[in-house]
Image (cartoon, coloured by chain):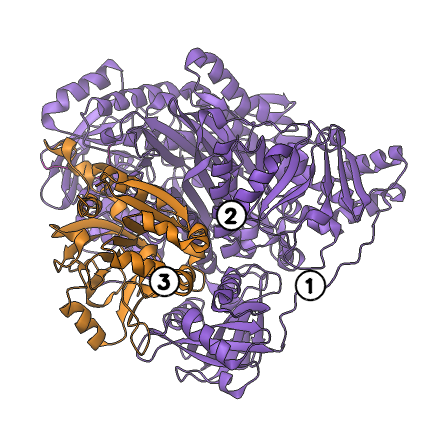
Amino acid sequence: MKPNVLILRAPGTNCDYETAYAFELAGATTERIHVNRLLEDPSIIDRFQIMCFPGGFSYGDDVAAGRVLASKIRLRLFDAVSRFKDADKLVLGICNGFQILIKSGILVADDEIGAPATLTWNAGGVYVDRWAHLEVKSDKCVFLRGVEKMYLPIAHAEGKFMGRDAAVLDALEAQGRLALRYAPGNNPNGAVRDVAGVCDETGRVFGLMPHPERHLDKTQRPDWTRWQNEPDFATKVGDGFAIFKNAVEYFA
Amino acid sequence: MLWEVDIFAAPGLPDVVGTETVADAADLGFSPNLTLGFARGYLLQGDLSREQVETLASRLLADPVVERASIGVVGDAVLAESLAGKTGKIVYVLPKPGVTDVVADAARQTATDFGIEPEAVRTFKKYWIDGVDAAEIERLARKLLANDAIEQVAFDELGFDSLQVGSPYKFELKTVSIRSMNDAELETLSKRGQLYLSLVEMQTIQKHFQDLDRDPTDVELETIAQTWSEHCSHKTLAGRISYSGPEGEIFFENMLKETIFGATVKIRENLGADDFCVSVFADNAGVVKFDDEYNVCFKVETHNHPSALEPYGGANTGIGGVIRDPMGTGLGAKPICNTDIFCFAPPQFDPNELPNGVLHPRRVIKGVVAGVRDYGNRMGIPTVNGSIFFDKRYLGNPLVYCGDVGLIPVDKSFKEPKVGDLIVAMGGRTGRDGIHGATFSSAELTSESETLSGGAVQIGNAIEEKKILDVMLEARDRGLYNAVTDCGAGGFSSAVGEMGEKIGAEVDLNAISLKYEGLSYAEMWISEAQERMVFSVPKDKWPELKALAESEDVEAIVLGEFKPTGRLVLKYDGVTVADLAMSFMHDGRPPVIRKAVYEVPTVEPITVKPEGVELPGQTAVSKTVACPCGGKESGKTSATLDLEAILGSLNVASKHWAIRQYDHEVQGGSVLKPLVGVECDGPGDAAVLRPRLTSRRGLVVSNGMNPNYGDYDAYWMAASAIDEATRNAVAVGADPTTISILDNFCWGNADKPEVLGSLVRAALACRDVSVAFGSPFISGKDSLNNEFRPEGEEPIAIPPSLLISAMGQMDDVAKAVSMDLKEAGNALYLVGETKRELGGSHLSLVRNWVGGQVPTLDVDVAKRTYIAVHKAIQSGLIRAAHDLSEGGLAVAAAESAFAGNLGAEISLAAIKLAPAADGESTALPGVDNVDDYWKLFSESNSRFLIEVPVEKSCAFEGILCDAKVPFAPVGKVVEKPELTIFGADGAVAVQGDLADLKRRWQKPFDLGGWYAD
């Protein structure tokens, strides 16, 4: 079946158009829906197969990145999203979406102490836009099937992945959930264990700081002009496309 | 009850803000003994239990994984303790009441999701400072921690226990007895009332009301002052000017119309059916054709004076404001990219020499970059192009140019408010912020400006603007309104006044929703609170528009109606508080008549500047890094040392510190980014983007500016700026026949004939070059009076600073060309003619030289060059192209080489210098091999360094020969990572290791804040 993707937007979401485009290019249908509609009627999400939290600055990232929308989801939409997750459906959070997923407890559930992991201020203390080489470190995540390496841009201020302690990280790592890592020398924010993306225990919920929707086209790569004369240039596809393709093919 | 929540880094994690603050303090000359601990925090007011505050602290305000919170009622002893164990004097810094505090607003609103309802919230920063005495701590607070324009400081204790803002307003109609005033009184009224009108203008207003037989109300006077302000009416440049210069005597009835607009009219005539302009100098941004379905529009604004007082807020609202220009063009464009160009004093400026009332350049730079970053990134608009210039004269008067390009459907490109339409305001609430911004920006800054005009400084709220944008684009596509414009300078006064100019408008001021109580009717009308747009809405569409806005948490209110009266009528509590004829507001201003003179300095031979004379831009060269060995490093040629010094000068040095803080890829259309090459760190000439994800058509954005040339001849400075913007755009692949350009003049006090004279001379060059290139001006803006008067001293004027922004187009982005060298073995060409032009050059800057010929421009050769280069790019002959600008051939070759991580071997022998004119001096002080020097460092316009595969050389040379474009094959790309340039005699003139050259270029303007893994 052709999956239907809910692209959730909120005040300050700003990657919704290109993310919807990425899913459509991969063969899905999409609808961009404001979070207020979901708060009015959470059952809206039941007609979708994929839910995507795109990048941006939801509610300005005021207080902390993703925190306001994450609180709304925790307090008012948690049941609906959990039901969605349990119905063998997919959830993807990109950048701000990753921050929302982790801070709402959807990606890494709270334990008796509280949230085991978070995304916080970059080690350098400032927003950074640059490209990073990435490596896939487990085969758990549906979105990363068949992918070994990717080259994608990051653009964030609060992307440093942190666990509460080593035990939390060891457990996540043992479950194959610290699925996407910055390649050596490419960690842009000081994330522990070079974590760039994390999936849940099912592999069907995935959050990542890099932006796959910004590398769909061959001319998005920063050094593409170096290859423009290569014979296979015309047919080249950006690395990020695989993530959307995998999501769509999950429902094939 | 007022609760305080202090938030600290968890044990074992670094205090990032504290550490950076200590480093910043050291930069400003504070004692190395200083220690500092930081906490951020919230004040929560209301009937809240400790448990509720704890809930908010642990689940909303702090992140328990990485932070710890301390909670108490304000004044509790526990709050004096730092959880990080820091001791010392406590300093609180918090926004002044009424200043935008978006984080506090978000916290208050989100608390309601937890079932907790604080009445008021405010954020603060808290420091524990030790190691220096109390006086030093106070100085630190003033110089670094807080900005008095928007923030208050409390030492030891907060000193208040309530967050009340505003008090009820009691209506009282105020009139101003202008009819009986003498001239001195009129002038006093103009200045004290911050109207900043001339005596003649005040007399005209006086006469108008004498004729009406009544005195104006305060709000009438304010409305007129805003409409007539330099900022809103450009009265000087669009006024009568009597000019005397090398061109002879010229009398302009309307200077801008006869130069810059005039050029556009002429070009459109010349182009006939190929005219690509849609709407120029008519709307909030200039509109040109893009493809069959969409047009693009572009606007560049400045926000200099607010940025001088509060760099973060000034730049923040600068970019926020210019984004609203394309949004307010036609029926609303979607912003697709931003540009920003800044002019600062060098960051190494000695803190002990800082005049009163001036912020240190380092603080200005960090604040401005952060302000642009936070607004642009939040809006989801990529910042794709920019520049930063340094000159001491920008010390009291930094320049902040912000630009925004929008994409607009062809059938939504025009607007027309209709009689009977409702006047609808959408967006943020109105507060006392920004009052007198329009009139203030037209005045000279003094050391007292900060106290006088602090109200003109504001902080933006990007998400409010993003919400308006989301609603507006949906409403536009549903056809819910007939016109839209932004509330910029002058607030509702300007927006409603302009929109209703041809009809008339009646407004009920009671409808305006306020941030807090206490605003008078006049303040409501002229407030320049950010993030507001005004729409002209047919009555039958209003319910749908209102519902749409509400569904996305955007406030929309009906202010009034466009009534066919030809008058602006304002009411408050049922009383008419203003009743002005639109005709008087818009056409009643007496013409400004100004004298302008310009004398072109004679070209003197290049000499070393005399002892004691200060070169204006001199400190732009960072001495510590430019030439670390002081010129004695063994084995290097003098030209190598000069190249290293130029690469390490601030204007040329890498701007990655700023660029990397901007999201330049959001919206997914990025093609050529600001930094290019193997390691994504080479300086791209221009940005290319693909605004429509489903199309291959590209948009090119570039700029040109060189204030150094203005010290020699304003004409050639302006011509060079247009040429630079054009060649940057052409270098990446823009079609030179569809480039549109924008002008932004930032000048000193235009009341001075010689200052205005240089501006007129620059405008004449704009006219000449625009027409010759066939590149129309589509929009522009000026900012005059950029002078700073230190206490008891003569004013310091900025150098004449003309920014030219260019927007080009290309059919297929896959043909774009970047500046990094691509492949060893390829041939290198110098395209264009090299003349002996080192006046105002960067070689002169690093060598302390004065004199010489400033770069000139042969428009015919330039045009032929651009068409030929574009043809070669379209034919796939070019692998890399880099424009030659500051530092000439040597710098361009070094940059292209290290960006491509490939060496270059270049010979100067093949380059033919233009013959010297009669009597022209060809000598250079202390230089033996002068011709090599001219070839290496001359900054002649219209030149490129181009890489061509050997097998395509014939075709490439053929195109240049056919077009009679001068060129020279100068060398080749090599594997070895070294730049080697041979002099005409075959000896090595320049030699450098690429990694070393790159390091020298990257280091000077890296202000820190990076994580290196």
Label 1 vs 2, first from the N-terminus: 1
Query: Are the numbered discs 3 and 1 placed on the same chain, yes or no?
Result: no
Query: Are the numbered discs 1 and 2 placed on the same chain, yes or no?
Result: yes
Give the SS element for disc 1.
loop
* Pointer 2 chain: B
Judge the density around disc 1: few (<14), some (14-19), many (≥20) Cα neighbours within 10 Å.
Answer: some
The magenta-colored residue range is B817-824
User: Which marked residue is nearer to the observer: mark 1 or mark 2?
Assistant: 2
User: Which marked residue is nearer to the observer: mark 3 or mark 1?
Assistant: 3
Picture quadrant of residue A161: bottom left
For the question of whether residue B446 can be seen, the reply is: yes
The answer to whether B951 appears left or right of B961 in the picture is left
* Magenta span contains residue B819: yes
Chain A rendering hue: orange
Q: Quadrant of the N terminus of chain B?
A: bottom right
Q: Give percent across and percent down for residue B1013.
A: 22, 63
Circles 1, 2 touching at the beta carbon (< 8 Å) = no
Of all chains in the rendering, the one displayed in purple is B
* Pointer 3 chain: A
- Which residue bears the numbered disc 2? B551
Q: Give percent across and percent down for residue B631.
A: 26, 54
- Please tell me which residue lies in front, B625 or A185: A185
- Residue furthest toward the bottom? B77
Tell me if residue B686 comes above or below residue A123 in the rendering. above
- Which residue bears the numbered disc 1? B166
Q: Give percent across and percent down for residue B470.
A: 47, 43
- Please tell me which residue lies in front, A61 or B397: A61
Tell me if residue A38 comes above or below residue B96 in the rendering. above
The answer to whether B197 appears left or right of A197 in the picture is right
Question: Which residue is located at x 80 percent, y 54 percent?
Answer: B171
Real-space Cα separation, disc 1 to disc 2, in angstroms: 29 Å
